[in-house]
Amino acid sequence: MRLKSISYFKSSNLIKINPAQLLSLGFLGLICVGTLLLMLPFATKDRHHLSFVDALFEATSAVCVTGLVVVDTQTTFTTFGQIVLMVLIQVGGLGFMTVGVLIALFLGKNIGLQGRLMIQESLNQLSLQGMVRLVKFVVGFTLLIEGIGAIILAIRFSSDFGIGKAVFYGIFHSISSFNNAGFDLMGGFSSVTGYVSDVTVILTLSSLLIIGGIGYTVILDVLKKKSFKKLSLHTKLVLLITLFLNVVGPVLIFILEYNNPGTLGVLDIKGKVLGAFFHGVVPRTAGFNSLNTAELTLSSQFVTMLLMFIGGGSGGTAGGIKVTTFVVIILAVWTLIRGRDEVNIMQRRIPQELVFRSFSITIYSTAVVFFILFILTITENAPLNFLLFEVISAFGTVGMSLGLTPELSIVGKVVIAFLMFIGRVGPLTIAFALAKRTKKLPFKYVEEKIMIG
Amino acid sequence: MRLKSISYFKSSNLIKINPAQLLSLGFLGLICVGTLLLMLPFATKDRHHLSFVDALFEATSAVCVTGLVVVDTQTTFTTFGQIVLMVLIQVGGLGFMTVGVLIALFLGKNIGLQGRLMIQESLNQLSLQGMVRLVKFVVGFTLLIEGIGAIILAIRFSSDFGIGKAVFYGIFHSISSFNNAGFDLMGGFSSVTGYVSDVTVILTLSSLLIIGGIGYTVILDVLKKKSFKKLSLHTKLVLLITLFLNVVGPVLIFILEYNNPGTLGVLDIKGKVLGAFFHGVVPRTAGFNSLNTAELTLSSQFVTMLLMFIGGGSGGTAGGIKVTTFVVIILAVWTLIRGRDEVNIMQRRIPQELVFRSFSITIYSTAVVFFILFILTITENAPLNFLLFEVISAFGTVGMSLGLTPELSIVGKVVIAFLMFIGRVGPLTIAFALAKRTKKLPFKYVEEKIMIG
Ligand SMILES: [K+]
Ligand SMILES: [K+]
């Protein structure tokens, strides 16, 4: 993430704003619009009018593609309200920056260097070249994949609902899944538990959320290159770690829940496999659940929390610290233990600056999660695992819950909404946006060792 | 920590052992001896014979100056058993290396370079000079402070017990406190809850454990230098952070527990202040408790866990990641957010290597803690806060518990004992001891960026 300040009034130099600030403000604006729309009388069904805090929470959850909900989406919102949520998810998922550029493109405007820097920030890209091409690709690819997903889901749902509802449900759940939002229209906070053994629904949702969560640069790289060898280091790492976690997660859940009567225990072997697979894949970071989350063993809750914290690939719709950050810190510690200096992987050297940044992101994220957790221990009356699960879910923009969300106090709702925002905009972006950037010192202080560890 | 391999058979080159391995083996040997002594029939009172796992747990807890106990020390052990524990605490606290050197000194042997390297490792020192002098100082200082503490406590206890018991209790609790062991002889797992409002006992124990936990180099530096300005950066940092945490901890506990009828709520204002002070200071890392830990609010448990994880100063009797590690990672993240490259504090620059190592220690420690926690979620049947509290307490060699220790399964006891060992020997030492050290690569790989965060 580059942080050159961009002046919008070059001659007057009155207002300086850096990309981190613009990105944060853009998301904030979108959340405000969403909040107002969801508070409209015809957004909610009779006697379900949302309070300001609840509307704020729901809008934040949608824009930040999290999926934590204080009210049940199906029973509370009218079709209008549900469409508002769907649009917020889509705009939030694509990133307001991409959408902004798209509008400019339609208006025939040229995208200058400053605009390109913005998009670069928004998509966390590595080079300025081809930014506009990338945005076009991102939008086209998103619509294509979501379209395919919507058709498959609509056909499947048509055997359960009328054709109109099946089509709407197909579109809604395809968008919700590809954008890793985890909102659903199944009613009664049930998510997709009714489809735990349904191959079509589970595999379609899984495919959508994995593709959406892997990051656009990876997809672009894979589509461009012919062989695995030619892929960038980033792409290789994301693909391998995603594969690794998508095997380890389900296997652990399968073992830990095999006999649990509240989850896999009551299912036949097909249901067990599908249920474990979905629950192992979903925490990074879609937030649907086909198993009753509150019934999971403490061990499975723990595994889920770890996966939620790690999250998906950078530059996609996923949250968390990201799989690459995770692998860099693991490798860095391993490098130290082995007595080496440089963090190498696949015959490439990870720049020292990236290692430092990965450590910082992880520590900073942990600090934020624990700080919010501490506030919740004061304001809420719930066991630690309920609170920790909720906090990590919000930070990772996952949206799974042990059932605490609707029970949250007003303060609890506000801080969880804040955490979803931090999780979506990026763990360090808010800090970048708020902190006063200081000039580099023109000299170096004398070095002095201290004892640590 | 330097890790040059030292050959004990230079000519034959048969056995190579590095200081990390020697340190680990030394502690292991001491634990084995302790386990055998505690299993002797006359170490325990009638019908209290310890199983092997229980004896192993108790010996590990004493040698690693942790203080987690599966049986009550007063009601289970004979005076002989209690003396064994006291000696294990003293030897563990001083470090077996210091003791080894002392024996060599008494035998009139010269300490060669290799021996000095060992002691350096054991005390985590920065320079080779004056190692022997340091060891002499450490032993002398320890005995002096423990002696003063023992006298004060014995006088105070003489009004509650007979003179013989008062003297023994004075010595035992002074040693236990200075070495941050947290073992007590008050009976019924009650720790010092009976003295929560007793100024003499609370302030004596606090002074002992703070001095013992601050690290010998700091004490030496303070005794040598005349003014604060002349102190080493390490000493300044440790003093300031210790002061900071010893104010913040008690203040938070005071606020969070003020009205809790299970803890401070029933006490008068003097009791409230003393109780909050002691509970805020003790997690780093003495492990006594004057309040009923199990009755703490979840928020206070959280604060306690954080303090336990941070621990005390390097090179003393304290555990945890250490206050200096903590401050370095905080500063490093802040440095990144502010857009600077170098971690500066008090007009000194922290070497990049130390920053990297601080991050690694923190991440590695977190990983170890969470891995053991995951095992406990499978083997134990207890709420998350009980498990997490127990695990962090063992890692930080603190010894506080919400009451889970005596209820642990056999697997639980073994992994907690293992964690106390890791926590005492040093988060990375075991890894250093086990990992195959690799030679530096004779070339550098090509650098390639990846997207993170
Ligand atoms: K989500
Ligand atoms: K202790």
Image: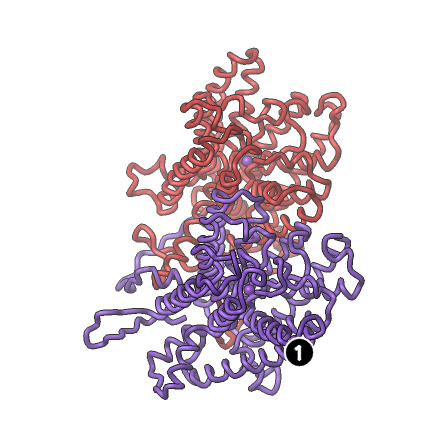
Chain colours: A red, B purple
**Residue designated by label 1:** B152
Q: Is residue A344 above or below residue A136?
A: below
Task: Please provide percent x and percent y for residue B111.
Answer: 36, 84
All told, the count of numbered labels is 1
Residue beneath the point at 31% across and 50% down:
A346
- SS for callout 1: helix
Task: Please provide percent x and percent y for residue B360.
Answer: 45, 60
- Front-lying residue, A200 or B40: B40
Task: Please provide percent x and percent y for residue A440.
Answer: 54, 67
Query: Could you tell me which chain the residue with mark 1 belongs to?
Result: B
Q: Is residue A329 visible?
A: yes
Residue beneath the point at 68% across and 78% down:
B155
Q: Quadrant of ligand 1?
A: top right
Q: In which quarter of the image is residue B127?
A: bottom left
Residue beneath the point at 75% across and 33% down:
A51
Q: Name the side, left or right, on which B446 lies relative to A220.
A: left
Q: Which residue lies furthest to the right in this view?
A: B268
- Front-lying residue, B199 or A163: B199
Q: In this view, does A294 lie above or below B337?
A: above
Q: Name the side, left or right, on which A24 lies relative to B275.
A: left
- Front-lying residue, A278 or A257: A257
Q: Which residue lies furthest to the front in this view?
A: B46
Q: Name the side, left or right, on which B335 lies relative to B300.
A: left
Q: Is residue A137 visible?
A: no
Q: Which amino acid does label 1 sit on?
A: Ile
Q: In which quarter of the image is residue A84?
A: top right
Task: Please provide percent x and percent y for residue A369.
Answer: 59, 49
Pointer 1 local density, CA inside 10 Å: few below 14, some 14–19, many at least 20:
some
Q: Is residue A198 above or below residue A129?
A: above
- Front-lying residue, A150 or A448: A448
**Disc 1: residue Cβ within 8 A of ligand 2's nearest atom:** no
